[in-house]
Amino acid sequence: MSPPRTERAGRMIAAALALCSIVAGCSDIYFDRRDTIALSGGDAVAGNAVAQTVDPWPPHSGNANIAFNGQRMQSAVEHYRWDKVTPPVDPMMMQVAGPSLAPPVPASPQGGSAGGPAPTSGGQP
């Protein structure tokens, strides 16, 4: 004969409560509690220093008038467009060997750079 329904429900509730109490013992919420309001509590001196700083940026950081050379920028864009970019040179090799020992860049028979397309006239490739 099976036990009454209420007895079986009571056992299920007791088992659920026992399981919840066992799992709750694994929680670390007790260790997360602090005596401070925030995790940065105790930094009042540093907080006051930041709050009283007038402007933390250097004065020249707001200068939007940046000096540049438009002709030089245009020349650089044209060099990239026609693939005539000078490859970078290692500064240490310049000090040791000097720039005269670098191999010369061969010119193409059409007068353009060795790696890029030569400009054409008349719109035909």
Image (cartoon, rainbow, N blue to C red):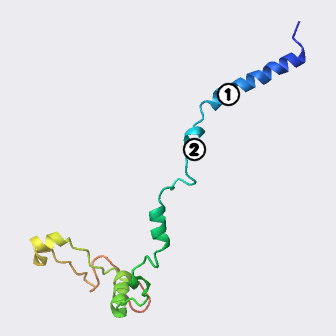
Q: Secondary structure at mark 1?
A: helix
36 displayed left or right of 46: right
Q: Nearer the viewer, residue 19 or 66?
A: 19
| Disc 2/disc 1 C-alpha distance (Å) | 20 Å
Across and down, in percent, residue 33 comes to 57, 44
Image location of residue 68, percent across then percent down: 36, 90
Depth check, front residue: 119 or 19: 19
- Residue 33: assigned label: 2
Amino acid at circle 2: Arg
Q: Is residue 11 left or right of residue 1?
A: left
Task: Say what amino acid the circle numbered 1 marks.
Answer: Ser
Q: How far across and how far down the image is residue 119, in percent?
A: 36, 87
Whole-percent x, y for residue 49 in the image: 45, 69
User: Within 10 Å of the Cα at label 1, are there few (<14), some (14-19), or many (20+) other Cα atoms?
Assistant: few
Picture quadrant where residue 12 is located? top right
Q: Residue at x 48, y 74 (%)?
A: 52
55 to 8, vertically: above or below: below
Q: Which mark is residue 40?
A: none
- Label 2 crowd (10 A; few <14 / some 14-19 / many >=20): few
Image position of 57 with respect to 13: above or below: below
Residue visible at 26% across and 75% down in the picture? 87
Mark 2 or mark 1: which comes first in sequence? Answer: 1
Label 2: element kind? loop
Q: How many marks?
A: 2
Please tell me which residue is depicted at 38% across the width and 82% down the height of the picture: 81
Q: Which residue is mark 1?
A: 21
Q: Which quarter of the picture shows residue 14?
A: top right
Please tell me which residue lies in front, 106 or 94.
94
